[in-house]
Amino acid sequence: MKKNLTLFAFTLGIAFINPFSSVLAQIPIPQPIEAPPATPETPPASLPPLQKVDIDTVCTPQNCLGWDEQLWGQQGDKQALLTAIDNSLRYLESNRAIAAYQTYPITEITLDRVRRSLVRFREVVISSQSAAELQAAVRREFVFYQSIGNDNKGTVKFTAYYEPVYTASRVRTSVYKYPLYRLPKDFQKWPKPHPKRIDLEGKNGLLGNKSRLKGLEILWFSNRLEPYMIHIQGSAQIRLTNGQRTSVGYAGGTDYPWTSIGKELAKDGKLPISGLTMPKLISYFRQNPRQLSNYLPRWERFVFFAETNGRPATGSLLIPVTAERSIATDKDIMPPGALALIVNSFPYPNSSGKLESRLVNRFVLDQDTGSAIKGPGRVDYFLGSGQLAGDRAGISGGNGLLFYLLLKE
């Protein structure tokens, strides 16, 4: 799915909220969560991406690793965590997982150890009756490997992504005229450099019959931002104009790096980079719709899709991703499908419906990746599907910590 990812800290271009939703006018959106000063995207020295750590050295009286209180209480989501674990275990049985771990750079992190760690952790989750009991079992049986982060000191930049829900038509009309395309059958034979976005859809997104993609349209949208955001997120749930439902998922993409339109707007002085949230970005394009033709083509990469007929959001490991329990990282250096723990602040609705920051100390599964998620200092956190997930993803960010958990040898 994260061929895709959301990045509002402007690396990825984040979770767009449905541009035509009235919810933005009804639910107050806070300012972006304050984060520590930015750190380099690439560590200054070449070190293994994960380092074994003594968790007592990173615990404080206010926050000690493995205190996942979200698993208990009225809103407990233990089943979501178990589902995510089962999805990873299914991946680890695949030939793709075998191939991935044959070349994994940290020799003590093997497919067998990752699998055994998940099996045992699942047993511990089921048997534990409190956050304290789970934390004690984890500290007793597991060892922690910390990401070196952006600075070789563990600083990891977090963003969040989500699966949008949009309305679309199966046929082009005067209203629904912006297409989403399927992967060309001969795509693997396309010479490089690939055509750029502007070459495939035109400056205004309406190249139509003049495009080499003519006849590959899957769905048509009423607003150009919507298919563009699906390109970023990598999947979407679709409400069809005939009342039916379907979904689309990533099928391939041209070979170009990520470009953030938020960053481009700030560079041109259209919006201040300080305090720039997704609602502000959407508001700008509502007031200046002609600017879409100027800014959207600046991301030269073009993404293709397949209809998935209502299937849940699926990550790069070809297994479903689970809201609040799946992350995306750089799969060249992080162990695919493995158990991890993240520490960072994310926005949650309070009793009055406003979004406010809350510290998360949460067990997750590493099940996705993305073109903007590179290096040991980047994590994208999956927040689920729909409007609220999009609102939250649009203001998520900050610097936090990332650990992987493996059974002691």
Image (tube, rainbow, N blue to C red):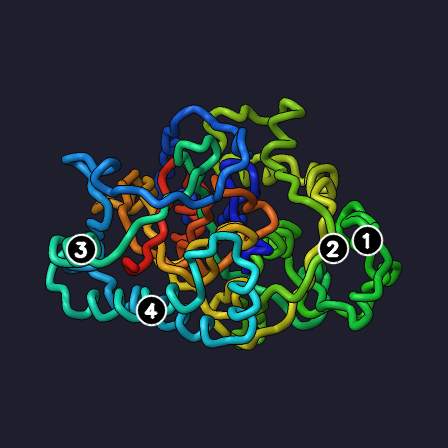
On-image quarter of the N terminus: bottom right
Earlier-in-chain disc, 4 versus 3: 4
Pointer 4 residue: 116
Q: Indicate left or right for 83 with 39 as reference.
A: left
Q: Nearer the viewer, mark 4 or mark 2?
A: 4
Q: Position of residue 264 (x, y in %)?
A: 65, 32
Q: Residue at x 88, y 59 (%)?
A: 210
- Find out whether the residues at labels 4 and 2 contact each other: C-beta distance under 8 Å: no
Q: Amino acid at mark 4?
A: Arg
**Does residue 22 appear in this view?**
no
Q: Nearer the viewer, mark 3 or mark 1?
A: 3
Pointer 3 residue: 140
Q: Amino acid at mark 3?
A: Arg
On-image quarter of the C terminus: bottom left
Q: Residue at x 64, y 69 (%)?
A: 169
Q: Secondary structure at mark 3?
A: helix
